[in-house]
Image (tube, grey):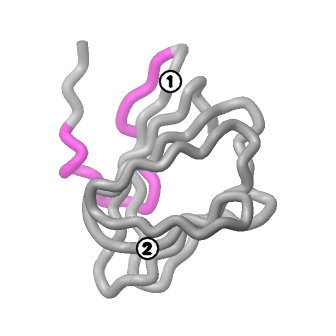
Amino acid sequence: MERIDTDAATGFFDVVAETDRSKGATMILEAGQTTGGPTNRHPDADQWLYVKSGRGTATVEGEPVELRPGTLVLLEAGDAHEIANDGDEPLVTINIYAPPDY
């Protein structure tokens, strides 16, 4: 068992835990910042993205998904995706990759 304090994250992308089967990371996008795009895929790993705070949009396979606190999005292996902060405050997410990616 491992307990992780995700409030300690300060960087754009910080890996906070990893095993042979999964990886956890935090991501902070500032207002107007985006990551990914139509060619961004994790061919062998699912990504679970949980919105801790802020607002934005995930574009998954060309379909927009509203992101707000409490939203949980599954990006299945191979899904093209982009995450955009279209709010006024930082968009803070917790991401789980299974199996580990990156």
Report the side of 102 relative to 38 (left or right).
left
Q: Are marks 2 and 1 in contact (CB under 8 Å)?
A: no
Q: Which residue is mark 1?
A: 22
| Nearer to us in this view, 32 or 18 | 32
Q: Which residue is mark 2?
A: 56
Question: Total marks drawn?
Answer: 2
Report the side of 86 relative to 1 (left or right).
right
Quadrant into which the C terminus falls: top right
The answer to if 32 sits in the magenta stretch is no
The image quarter containing residue 69 is: bottom left
Callout 2 crowding tier (Cα within 10 Å): few <14, some 14–19, many ≥20 = many
Residue type pointed to by label 2: Gly
| Nearer to us in this view, 59 or 97 | 59
Report the side of 58 relative to 52 (left or right).
right
**What residue is drawn where x is 73% and y is 55%?**
80
The answer to if 7 sits in the magenta stretch is yes
Query: Up-down: is 91 above or below 98?
Result: below
* Gap between marks 2 and 1 measured at Cα: 25 Å
Describe the element under mark 1 as helix, strand or loop: loop
Query: Up-down: is 3 above or below 13?
Result: above
Describe the element under mark 2 as helix, strand or loop: strand
Callout 1 crowding tier (Cα within 10 Å): few <14, some 14–19, many ≥20 = some
**What residue is drawn where x is 45% and y is 82%?**
86
Report the side of 76 relative to 91 (left or right).
right
Query: Up-down: is 92 above or below 30?
Result: above
Q: Identify the mark nearer the N-term, 2 or 1.
A: 1
State the image coordinates of residue 65 (x, y, percent, origin top left).
52, 65
Q: Which residues are magenta?
A: 5-19
The image quarter containing residue 55 is: bottom left
